[in-house]
């Protein structure tokens, strides 16, 4: 086998929907204020009895079903999350236990909003090296647990959810070379810290970095896979907010691509946002099997990771 591919996708969101009007009853804000600044209309919020590993397991089960596989076909489980409450067992082990995956390698990756694309690259490398045959790669976050519901600049952004991909060995590469990196000295720009842990960010710094520094990096990710931006069928960026997603996509120059805008209905779900949005595009028939799709995550630690993949 010379590469890996995404065999199937799945996603899951909690049933509870929090609207902008609901938020206006909690903090000094309004539907117009939120839409004009971040483009978000609604977000899904998990209840106290819905932990991160439950969200992740639901999405993973859907991906397995879509691939026509069973838990026993999986030998690696990777969960990208920054909202795990406990240090051990990790989220990957808990998801594997929920699904009944026998004896998998289990690892969590905390690269915040770029977590899923880092995890996807890790699965690709592991499968191509022969250390695993099939992997579950999951992005899952419960951002409502770390939101400051008194801060209108951040609480209006967040949502909860999970997305998952089944990655398996393939004769031809279906996951392109990753481009990844970070700006660690600017790690303070996006934070989840303190006791209790709370999400905070320097919004203007993040906006300037994302809209000026990331477009050339996204083009490099395309080049590594042998594509020009105009060749892309879809672009799935981290769903931070529409004021970042839309300018970044425009500067990339993917003029023929469908641009994922799931943030409008799901909010910023951190590591879940890319697989969640990608899975929805596939489910809606907006992209077809074999189409080249750019996935590009960015955010906490001012980390980024992106690759072009073939649509399952």
Image (cartoon, rainbow, N blue to C red):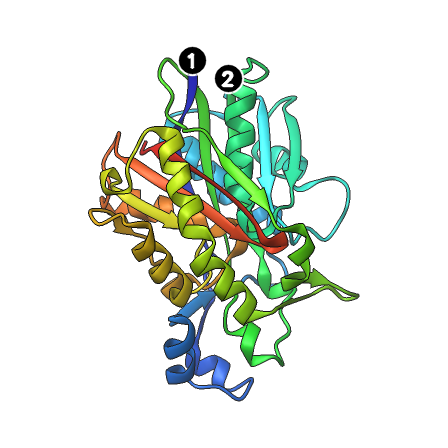
Q: Give x and y (percent) for residue 304.
A: 53, 46
Q: Residues within 10 Å of mark 1 (few under 14, many from 20)?
A: few
Which residue position is annotated with label 2?
A: 128
In this rendering, the answer to whether 1 lies above or below 182 is above
Tag of residue 2: 1
Question: In which quadrant of the rendered view does residue 15 lie?
Answer: bottom left
Q: Nearer the viewer, residue 14 or 92?
A: 92
Who is closer to the viewer here, 150 or 183?
A: 183
Which quadrant would residue 64 be assigned to in this image?
A: top left
- Residue 280 rendering spot, x and y as whole percentages: 33, 48
- Locate residue 89 relative to residue 29 in the image: left or right: right
Q: Is 278 situated left or right of 50 in this image? A: left
Where 27 falls versus 113 (above or below)?
below
Image spot of residue 267 (x, y percent): 45, 64
Q: Secondary structure at mark 2?
A: helix
Q: Please, which residue is most extreme toward the top here?
A: 1
Q: Residue at x 33, y 55 (%)?
A: 251
Q: Which quadrant holds the C terminus?
A: top left
Can residue 247 be seen here? yes
Query: Where's the N terminus, which quadrant?
Result: top left
Residue 12 is at least partly visible in this image: no
Q: Are marks 2 and 1 in contact (CB under 8 Å)?
A: yes
The 10 Å Cα crowd at callout 2, few under 14, some 14 to 19, many 20 or more, is some
Residue drawn where x is 36% and y is 41% of the image: 294
User: In the rendering, which numbered label is found on residue 148?
Assistant: none
């Amino acid at each position: 086998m010379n590469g890996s591919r995404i065999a199937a996708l799945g996603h899951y969101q909690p049933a509870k929907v929090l609207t902008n009007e609901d938020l206006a009853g909690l903090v000094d804000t309004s539907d117009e204020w939120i839409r004009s600044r971040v483009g978000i209309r609604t977000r899904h919020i998990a209840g106290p009895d819905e932990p991160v590993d439950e969200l992740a397991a639901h999405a993973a089960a859907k991906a397995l079903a879509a691939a026509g596989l069973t838990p026993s076909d999986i030998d690696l489980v990777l969960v990208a999350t920054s909202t795990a409450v406990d240090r051990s067992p990790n989220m990957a082990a808990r998801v594997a236990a929920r699904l009944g995956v026998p004896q998998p390698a289990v690892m969590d990756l905390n690269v915040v909003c770029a977590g899923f694309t880092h995890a996807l690259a890790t699965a690709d490398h592991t499968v191509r090296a022969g250390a695993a045959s099939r992997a579950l790669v999951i992005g899952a976050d419960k951002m409502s647990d770390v939101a400051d519901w008194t801060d209108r600049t951040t609480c209006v952004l967040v949502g909860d959810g999970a997305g998952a991909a089944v990655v398996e060995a393939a004769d031809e590469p279906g996951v392109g070379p990753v481009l990844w990196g970070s700006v660690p000295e600017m790690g303070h720009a996006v934070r989840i810290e303190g006791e209790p842990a709370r999400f905070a960010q320097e919004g203007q710094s993040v906006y300037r970095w994302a809209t000026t520094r990331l477009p050339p990096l996204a083009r490099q990710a395309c080049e590594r896979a042998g594509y020009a931006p105009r060749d892309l069928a879809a672009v799935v960026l981290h769903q931070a907010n529409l004021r970042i997603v839309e300018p970044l996509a425009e500067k990339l120059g993917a003029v023929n691509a469908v641009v994922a805008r799931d943030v409008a209905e799901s909010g910023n779900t951190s590591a879940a946002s890319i697989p969640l949005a990608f899975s929805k595009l596939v489910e809606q028939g907006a992209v077809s099997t074999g189409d080249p799709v750019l996935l590009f995550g960015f955010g906490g630690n001012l980390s980024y990771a992106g690759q072009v993949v073939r649509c399952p």
